[in-house]
Image: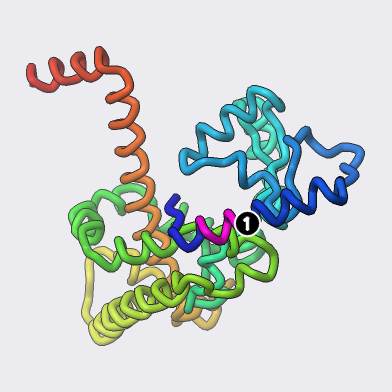
């Protein structure tokens, strides 16, 4: 999670201002009767002052004090944080439908593919249709193995890296109520520029598939299946062109982000435990 220098200055100003209000007026909010435990929040800031760039470590420290289920506020946005397996199971399995819709961070407001998201789409007909399509056709059986080399090549392209840097950047102003619609530091503009480049690339690919649609093919890939659904007048959901484009954007970002985050955390943990790093080196040397 990256924070710009401008963000830091803005955050300092808000912190001083909110602290002044807190001590003058002693503002407090009455919690709902069944609200989870929560740290003391500052006006405007919420719990932003308790969170560092190492977000998981910050939440872990707070969970030790406030329990496995707590409420965290960032600006005007509230989050429910589950920190143990039993609580997470109750949320993700027993009450999956109630928690299926996801919070949309501020960079999504600068997405040029309006209402075309699948991963962050609200739980409903479109989300259920795409999930079923993924499980039964798009990623079934050997489909993933057939395109491993293509996915590996795509992760090396710079469009995915520009997009990731802009889409993952968090600004306090962007999560604070109506301010998240204001592009204070130009990050939204950079994100839209990267997405337009991606849009031009994927549009060219779609046109190539459409030009070759008459040619016989033994096996259909993901684009073939999506375009079939796009052209099918009897399909349960008529996909739009933007929905197809955003589906591939979700795949690209998810593949790059999850892999890089896992590698970074693995390396950090190995550096914190030198004896385990030496053990790993010995095993790799033997191979």
Q: In this rendering, would 201 be left or right of 16?
A: left
Determine whether, in the image, residue 257 is placed left or right of residue 51.
left
The answer to whether 178 appears left or right of 144 in the picture is right
Where is 34 relative to 79, above or below?
Answer: above
Q: Residue at x 71, y 50 (%)?
A: 78
In this rendering, the answer to whether 35 lies above or below 253 is: above
| Residue at left offset 60%, top offset 67% | 126
Instruction: Report the predominant secondary structure element of the magenta stretch.
Output: helix
Instruction: Kindly give the residue lying farthest to the left in the view shown.
Output: 286
Q: Nearer the viewer, residue 89 or 209?
A: 89
Residue 273 position, x and y percent, is 31, 18
Q: Can residue 149 be seen by looking at this rendering?
A: yes
Q: How far across and how far down the image is residue 242, in percent? A: 46, 78
Residue drawn at (53%, 67%) of the image: 108
Queried whether the magenta region covers residue 136, the answer comes back as: no
Along the viewing direction, whichever of 134 and 78 lies nearer the viewer:
78
Neighbour tally class for label 1: few under 14, some 14-19, many 20 plus, Cα within 10 Å: few
Visible residue check, residue 127 = no
Residue assigned mark 1: 103
Residue 213, quarter of picture: bottom left
Asked whether 240 or 59 is in front, the reply is: 59
Magenta extent? 8-14
Kind of element beneath mark 1 = loop
* Colour option used: rainbow
x, y percentage for residue 132?
A: 53, 57
Residue 280 in the image, given as x and y percentages of width and height? 20, 19
Residue 234 versus residue 139: which sits nearer the camera?
Answer: 139
Image quarter of the C terminus: top left
| Marker count (numbered) | 1
Residue sitting at 15 percent across and 20 percent down? 281
């Amino acid at each position: 999670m990256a924070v710009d220098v401008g963000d830091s200055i803005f955050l300092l100003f808000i912190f001083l201002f909110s602290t002044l209000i807190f001590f003058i007026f002693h503002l407090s909010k009455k919690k709902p009767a069944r609200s989870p435990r929560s740290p003391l929040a500052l006006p405007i800031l919420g719990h932003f002052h308790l969170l560092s760039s190492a977000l998981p470590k910050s939440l872990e420290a707070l969970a030790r004090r406030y329990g496995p289920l707590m409420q965290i506020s960032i600006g005007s946005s509230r989050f429910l944080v589950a920190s143990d397996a039993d609580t997470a199971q109750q949320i993700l399995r027993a009450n999956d439908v109630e928690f299926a819709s996801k919070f949309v961070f501020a960079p999504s407001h600068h997405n040029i593919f309006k209402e075309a998201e699948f991963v962050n789409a609200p739980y409903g007909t479109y989300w259920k249709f795409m999930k079923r399509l993924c499980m039964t056709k798009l990623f079934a059986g050997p489909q993933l193995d057939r395109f491993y080399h293509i996915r590996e090549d795509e992760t090396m392209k710079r469009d995915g890296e520009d997009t990731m840097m802009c889409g993952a950047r968090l600004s306090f102003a962007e999560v604070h109520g109506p301010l998240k619609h204001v592009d204070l530091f130009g990050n939204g503009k950079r994100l839209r520029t990267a997405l337009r480049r991606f849009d031009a690339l994927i549009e060219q690919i779609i046109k190539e598939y459409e030009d070759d649609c008459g040619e016989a093919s033994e096996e259909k890939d993901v684009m073939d299946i999506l375009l079939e659904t796009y052209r099918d007048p009897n399909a349960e959901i008529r996909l739009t062109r933007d929905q197809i484009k955003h589906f591939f954007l979700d795949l690209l970002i998810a593949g790059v982000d999850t892999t890089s985050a896992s590698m970074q955390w693995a390396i950090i943990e190995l550096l914190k435990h030198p004896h385990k790093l030496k053990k790993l080196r010995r095993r790799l040397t033997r191979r």
